[in-house]
Image (cartoon, rainbow, N blue to C red):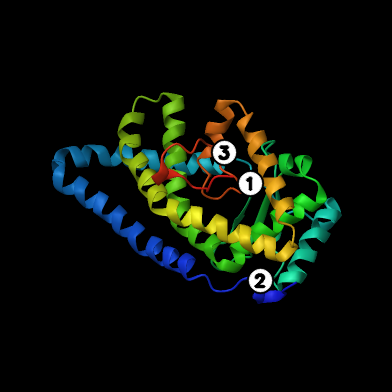
Amino acid sequence: MAHGRELFPADRGLQARMVAVCVFTPLLLIAWIVAIVVLVPLVIVAYLAPFLLLGIAAAVAASRSQPYPRSSARHEAPELHALVERVCAMTGLAKPRIVFSPSSQPNSWVVVRPGYPARLFITIGMLELLEAEELEAVVAHELAHIAHHDAAVMTIVAGPGVTMLAGSLLLVRKGLPWWLLSAAIATPVGVITRIATAALSRYRELAADASAVAITGKPLTLARALRKVSGTLQATPSRDLREIAVHDAFNLVAAGPQRHAWLRTHPDI
């Protein structure tokens, strides 16, 4: 079996998509802002500006209102820590911080912010659903995102759009009188970001799957884990799905429906 960086050869297709997303996503957002300023009368723009600020504030508040999971200490989950350390030793990667998400929905993702250690998020539902061998395949998949650097690109590029879209959905559910104005501006930002990152998201999942198979040497184990997680999410009530689907671009398996090809964040299971 290969070791260290041999498990993560340069993927030119992935690199090209990351560059394209980093370049074109900001350009699309700038074009959207310019279009609003140019096409909409200045009086209306001035009237909408406070509502836009309120929408942004609501999005940030909604994000901060959620309890932020703390990093797990080794004594709290010694078996999981040992599993992650074993995979890191095989790949030559630094061990990420392990963070438990209290969600009962089985999923996992990584967040990489510049200047901060990588964080591996695993939901309680994931730990309860998968066997140790399957969980190892999932961890290998997530570590591949760190090795390929696509996790950092997705965090930086998709993060703000995801937050804005989540804030818009929150305003809609609350039925606030000014939700339409704020959502009219905030929602396209999230949609533009999602369209721009969808192609990268689908490709990076396949690249991470390939690396996970190279690390573990057990393709059927990874396939079994993905099918388990996907099957459990399909049985989740639609209301719960809507609350977690806004983070699809980061998740191991998409929680929301994948109806439109240009919005799909994951390849077919």
- Callout 3: 10 Å neighbours few (<14), some, many (20+)? many
Amino acid type, callout 1: Tyr
Say whether marks 1 and 2 touch (CB < 8 Å).
Answer: no
Q: Pointer 2: what residue?
A: 7
Placement of the N terminus among the 4 image quadrants:
bottom right
- Which mark sits nearer the N-terminus, 2 or 3? 2
Q: Position of residue 186 (x, y in %)?
A: 35, 41
Q: Pointer 1: what residue?
A: 68
Q: Seen in the image, is 234 located left or right of residue 182?
A: right
Amino acid type, callout 3: Ala
Q: Which residue is drawn at 35% across and 64% down?
A: 23
Q: Pointer 3: what residue?
A: 255
Q: Which of 14 and 239 is in front in this view?
A: 14
Tell me the CA gap for discs 1 and 2.
33 Å
Please tell me whether mark 2 sits on a helix, a strand or a loop: helix
Q: Is residue 86 depicted above or below 37 in this figure?
A: below
Amino acid type, callout 2: Leu
Q: Residue at x 41, y 48 (%)?
A: 194
Q: Which residue is drawn at 59% across and 73% down?
A: 9
- Which mark sits nearer the N-terminus, 1 or 2? 2
Q: Is residue 236 depicted above or below 62 in this figure?
A: above
Tell me the CA gap for discs 2 and 3.
28 Å
Say whether marks 2 and 3 touch (CB < 8 Å).
Answer: no
Q: Where is residue 138 in the image (x, y as percent from the top left)?
A: 70, 53
- Callout 1: 10 Å neighbours few (<14), some, many (20+)? few
Q: Position of residue 241 (x, y in %)?
A: 56, 32
